[in-house]
Image (tube, rainbow, N blue to C red):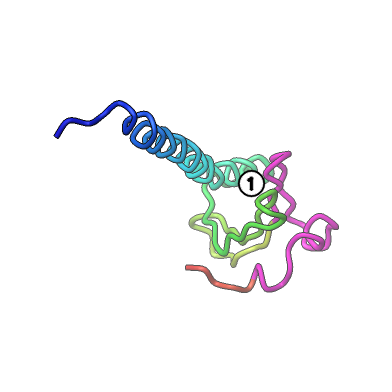
Amino acid sequence: MKLSRPFMFLLVIPVMASAALGALIFGSDAMSDSGVDADIQRALADQIPASRLFELRNLQEVQYGYGICGSYRAIGADDGYASFFYDTINHKIVRDVNAQAFTSNCSLSAICRDTQ
């Protein structure tokens, strides 16, 4: 079957271009989300130099993805989990549950809900 030139210009090429653009947009979004865990662990390690590896739990995006609330604990520690708020724009972590950044962004339900 021979494809005519108008068919290619009106249907095939726009569909292929749309698929490529969609893959580029959603693929880059998925790749950027995968690095957030490493960013959070790096920020925790900067504040808690005694431990370099942390287990993260109950991660929940807040403020339309501009922040992440969750729980952490040092791997190998007998302590329980502690709460945090991570600002994805400024790459700052807040571990004080009484701080304004934590209380205004993280509700109790974001910390208590188990997502695993």
**As rendered, which of 99 and 32 lies closer to the eye?**
32
The crowding category of the residue bearing disc 1, from other C-alpha atoms within 10 Å (few below 14, some 14 to 19, many at least 20), is: many
- State the image coordinates of residue 5 (x, y, percent, origin top left): 30, 26
Residue located at (37% from left, 29% from top): 9
Find the residue positioned furthest to the right.
Answer: 100
- State the image coordinates of residue 4 (x, y, percent, origin top left): 26, 29
**As rendered, which of 15 and 9 lies closer to the eye?**
9
Query: Which of the 4 image quadrants contains residue 100?
Result: bottom right
**As rendered, which of 110 and 93 lies closer to the eye?**
110
Q: How many marks?
A: 1
Query: Which of the 4 image quadrants contains residue 45?
Result: top right
Q: Secondary structure at mark 1?
A: helix
**2, above or below 112, in the image:** above
Quarter of the rendering occupied by the N terminus = top left
Q: Is residue 99 magenta?
A: yes
- State the image coordinates of residue 62 (x, y, percent, origin top left): 68, 58
**62, above or below 20, in the image:** below
- State the image coordinates of residue 71 (x, y, percent, origin top left): 61, 61
- In this image, 12 relative to 25: left or right? left
Residue located at (65% from left, 54% from top): 68
Magenta residues (range): 85-111
Residue located at (54% from left, 47% from top): 37
Q: Amino acid at mark 1?
A: Leu
Residue, disc 1 = 44
